[in-house]
Amino acid sequence: MTAPVKIPPATLARLAKLGIHHRADLLLHLPLRYEDETRLVPISAVQPGMSAQVQGVVAHSEVAFRPRRTLVCRLQDSGGELYLRFLNFYPSQQKQLAEGKQIRAAGEARMGYYGLEMVHPKCRAAGDDTPLPQSLTPVYPATAGLSQATLRKLIAGALGSLPLDDTLPEALRQRMKLASFADSVRLLHNPPPDIAASALEGRSHPAWRRIKFDELLAQQLSMRAHLRQRGKRAAPRLAPQHRLTAQLINNLPFALTGAQQKAYAEISRDLDRPHPMQRLLQGDVGSGKTVVAALAALQAMENGYQVALMSPTEILAEQHYLKLRDWLAPLGIAPVWLSGSLKKKDKLAAVERIARGETQLAIGTHALFQEQVQFRKLGLVIVDEQHKFGVQQRMALRNKGKAAPEDDAEPPRPPHLQGGEGGFQEPHQLMMSATPIPRTLAMSYYADLDVSVIDELPPGRTPVITKLVSDARREEVLERVRAACLEGRQAYWVCPLIEESDAMERELQNAIETHQALCAAFPEINVGLAHGRLDSAEKARVMAAFKAGEVQLLVATTVIEVGVDVPNASLMVIEHAERMGLAQLHQLRGRIGRGVARSLCVLLYQQPLSELARARLKIIYENTDGFEIARHDLLLRGPGELLGARQSGVPMLRFADVSEDAALLEGARAIADEMLRDFPEAARLHLQRWMANRHDYLHA
């Protein structure tokens, strides 16, 4: 092995921008593509559109103005000539390409002003005895100020000076039929010319298979290790008392579905354990997640603990507050509402009630985890639409419970858990999502969570018919809305977010203008308006009037995406549906179909449609199942956007693809448990190679 070369501070700063913080990270900075500089092509054989490397003598070189300042060189070999053209160049390049110099030029040939030419080819001095490279030339992800030559030199140094020991035990490697790590890394950085470029750039070569497996294995090990660590942390045991929960079930005007009962049973068992629950409750729009969360909250309250329920938007948090207030009032429980828009006096009163332990349930937005909010005895945190919160926000709320209990009535804990981490008990955590997660995604990104799925809609939900309608037929849509409202039914008219720098203002203006236009078009109908800028009292008044049937048509921004439940609303019009994502369209559509009337969702779109917009509308038109829509969404958008994972702290994948590499993921999932159990040192070294210096909060 060679001694490593000292890297200048400026280069270190640029490497950090690429996520390279240690020399070992250079090993896994793999090429985007390759250039074949292992052979020379006679100039006479070069055709337009062909990428080639040629060698010859510069027969003529000049700076021309046609129409801008351009360096033009005529390169000749024994059988032909072509031109090299540079729009941006330095004096050193002029010198390198002076008449009589022998050079190699690599680039794509095309027909130009002078004839066959290469524009900005890669050039270097070369004699007849200059050897050709023995491997394809890698092209790496780069950043400003960091050249390919510098990256190649640094990576070559890392390959020559760092150990490439295999972190996968030999028996497991043989079982998975994988190439060795050292062979794979060396090949990907310096592939021989006889390897098909498609296998390298399509990442189907066995060397790529090994790298992708290792990355998936690191992700699984990381989350499984976190899962095991959770088992060492202390949480209050919240045993089912069957008092408040039974009362709520008896008071409900509907029976729980089998899926709801199963989900609550899983949550109830977790709450009765002395370790913090981290469970994801996922279910399609309208599947009844809120009542399951209410039962979990009551189980915590039955044991004398407080519950915090956090939602990403004020309107959704308020919907939860109103619904739970109505359900829990007969049980003698009055939730506290906390949001950023509350008056200072009301907010202070709510914060004091929470701190004194007078309220058992606090419901709100991110205001719940502000520094001044302190819980006396927090036992359960419920996070709705959890992927819309950053990981540090979720941690901040969970850490509100990290205080030694002062109440003598605390349930007894086993001796080996008394004190936990520094005397602290963590609250249990229940996360809810109406964005169904495809199985491969759940296996990859939620491997450290327990998952409950409500895969059954409550009885009485009617299927929603979806129609795609061009904006040119707007008058027909208006007539359909008028007829529905005059027949005694209700409708939504949704205005989308306009993607500009002043997006919120434009969205608001769009909704106000639409409201004015519809009021003028329907003088006989009461048209309401709901948007995110309304104060809480006005918003509550509008929503209450719509729910009571006093407002027949509600014009709204996407604030009604989640949480609104009006069974009599059976028609929805979504303007500019082509601008919206699949998950949002599915969420909005879920606001109707909650009563007995046949429901219709009209997606108004404007021509011309982009290919992506056309694909989205086709998927939402053809599918009503949220899991199937999420599967298509994964293919269209990728996991990071679908999960909100770019802000969540989830370790993102650079090389593997959870859709295409499902078989590798299955293998990595199985081997992760085996490595942690039988090869703990190998597991540690594997994580060190792949996760070193990466902030990985692991679904905190």
Image (cartoon, rainbow, N blue to C red):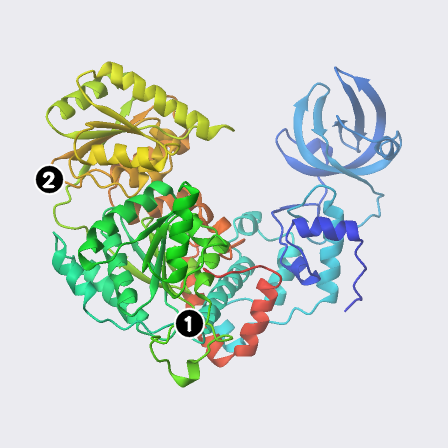
Pointer 1: residues within 10 angstroms few (<14), some, or many (20+)?
Answer: some
Q: Nearer the viewer, residue 408 or 381?
A: 408
Residue displayed at 82% across by 48% down:
130
- Does residue 66 appear to the left or right of 320 in the view shown? right
Q: Give x and y (percent) for residue 194.
A: 62, 53
Give the quarter of the image for residue 268. Answer: bottom left
Residue at (81%, 59%) from the top-left corner? Answer: 6
From this view, report whether residue 635 is shown above or below residue 523.
below
Residue 134 can be seen in this image: yes
Residue 330 placement, left or right of 355: left
Q: Position of residue 603 (x, y in %)?
A: 28, 29
In the rendered image, which residue does mark 2 sit on? 596
Percent coordinates x, y for residue 33 in the rendering: 61, 46
Whole-number angstrom distance, CA of label 1 to CA of label 2 = 49 Å
Say if 55 sits above or below 477 in the image: below
Q: Which quadrant holds residue 244?
A: bottom left
Q: Secondary structure at mark 1?
A: loop
Q: Quadrant of the N terminus?
A: bottom right
Question: On the image, numbered disc 1 is attached to which residue?
Answer: 405
Disc 1 vs disc 2: which is toward the camera?
1
From the viewer's side, name the closer residue of 144 and 406: 406
Name the kind of residue labelled 1 in the image: Pro
1 or 2: tag closer to the N-terminus: 1
